Amino acid sequence: MILVINIQMIAGLIVAAIGILALLKIGSFDKFSLDADELPEVIRKSRIWKKEFEFVSRKLGLVSKPDVIFKHNGQAIIGEVKTRKTFKIYQTDIIQMSVAKVVVEENGTAVSDVGFVKIATPEGTRWIDKQLMSRDEVMALKNRYDLIKSGKIVPGKCGNRVICHHCEFFEVC
């Protein structure tokens, strides 16, 4: 029996090995895992209330589907889960959680002004807390978005070619 190895087979084996090593490095990442060692105290004392549940506010024209919402003493706490190379929080993460806060509140539930992002990296996992935007700030962003979409105002350039090129307003801009 002759064993024939070609470049494609070798490349496939290398890709598979890299994938296995990456999984071992990050671990079997369960995005809703609540390992007590890594949790902030308020989350440790909370219970999961909703997972990937879509909230809609027709009145405000907003929709949100947070990864997880915890409940602690009757108050909801918004959580998002991200897999990244570093433990970095982006403004879009804060906006995403803030929109969720506004929509969940609009649906009759009190929500904490602080949200949590669970970030998994090759170095491990961390929960990072962030102050969320106010309802007025979220609505100002939404109104600006609506004005840009309708062509009533022109978006400013962000100055970053990579981000700018992937922006949904790239053609308008």
Image (cartoon, grey):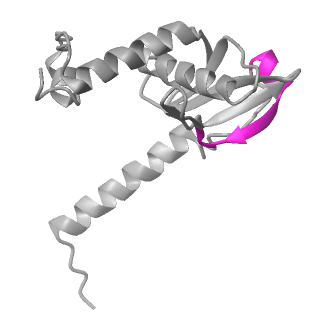
Magenta span contains residue 107:
no
**Residue 149 versus residue 89: which sits nearer the camera?**
149
Left or right for 165, reference 70: left
How many numbered discs, if any? 0
Image coordinates of residue 10 in percent, x first then y, are: 24, 63
Tell me if residue 52 is in the magenta stretch: yes
Residue 133 in sight in this render: no
State which quarter of the image contains the C terminus: top left
Q: Is residue 106 left or right of residue 153?
A: right
Tell me where the magenta segment starts and ends, as one range: 40-55
- Kindly identify the residue that appears in the image at 45 percent across and 43 percent down: 22
Quarter the N terminus occupies: bottom left
Q: Which of the two residues, 18 or 86, is positioned nearer the viewer here?
A: 86
Q: Is residue 119 left or right of residue 114?
A: left
Q: Quick check: 85 above or below 89?
A: below
Give the residue drawn at x 48%, y 30%: 61
Q: How far from the left and from the top, in percent, is residue 130?
A: 59, 11
Tell me: residue 4, above or below residue 126: below
